[in-house]
Image: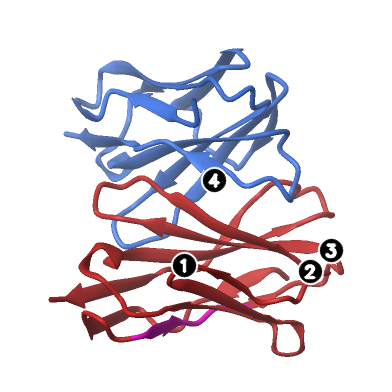
Chain colours: A red, B blue
Amino acid sequence: AQKVTQAQTEISVVEKEDVTLDCVYETRDTTYYLFWYKQPPSGELVFLIRRNSFDEQNEISGRYSWNFQKSTSSFNFTITASQVVDSAVYFCALSEAKGGSQGNLIFGKGTKLSVKP
Amino acid sequence: DTEVTQTPKHLVMGMTNKKSLKCEQHMGHRAMYWYKQKAKKPPELMFVYSYEKLSINESVPSRFSPECPNSSLLNLHLHALQPEDSALYLCASSLSGSSYNEQFFGPGTRLTVL
């Protein structure tokens, strides 16, 4: 069964703190894709990153970094030196290559991040 | 143009009304999606169109009727909705609908059913 778990419902930090958002996934497919999306209060989901199951390299983009570990089925997201503009709900999502669910995004429940000045 | 646009932004309708939500993209994407999102919940997939054909219908009630007039447009026709259908309706598109394609989302339509 496919599933994405974001155990942290809400996180509150003070500006400039580092924060890590956890994501654990379950899938039987050997080929799959993991995504992170940001949803600010305005409502639009913004694509942040895609990672495929064969590429375990970590990625850094500015203040954002992602740690993909197949051994623990985790794809964690770290924001360094957080800013107020990072306040949003962050969703981790899984897409499987097989099984009639091609292209379907299986979302976690989301983590609401509040960054206070 | 890397935008998905949705109209209207807000919609209030009675249970006997008929209304439509519209979605448009000009990125040349061939897959388009409708999602429903309730407050504090993740988006739930409703429909997927791939190359203008309905490929996935996630057991959505018939009071929601999707339409894809061409590869750039996606409509969602609403009829005889219930108050529990009040939600944010998100449209998305992706290059081909493959599992590795990221989806680009519109800003959504906030629907209130009275």
How far apart marks 3 and 4 lie (CA) works out to 21 Å
Pointer 1: what residue?
A: A62
Q: Which residue is mark 4?
A: B45
Q: Which residue is mark 2?
A: A53
Front residue of B22/A19: it is A19
| B15 over A33 or under it: above or below | above
Q: CA distance from mark 2 to mark 1?
A: 23 Å
* Magenta-tinted stretch: A18-24
Q: Callout 2, which amino acid?
A: Ser
**For the view shown, which residue lies furthest in the top direction?**
B69
Mark 3 near mark 1, Cβ–Cβ under 8 Å?
Answer: no
- In primary-sequence order, the first of circles 2 and 1 is 2
Task: Select label 4 or label 2 by which is in front.
Answer: 2
Between marks 3 and 1 in the image, the one whose residue lies nearer the viewer? 1
Secondary structure of the residue carrying numbered label 1: loop
User: On the rendered structure, is A55 left or right of A67?
Assistant: right
| Mark 3 or mark 1: whose residue is earlier in sequence | 3
Q: Are marks 2 and 3 in contact (CB under 8 Å)?
A: yes
Circle count: 4
The subunit carrying tag 2 is A
First-in-chain label (2 vs 3): 3
Q: What x and y, as percent, mark residue B95?
A: 68, 34
Q: Which residue is mark 3?
A: A31
Q: What amino acid does circle 3 point to? A: Thr
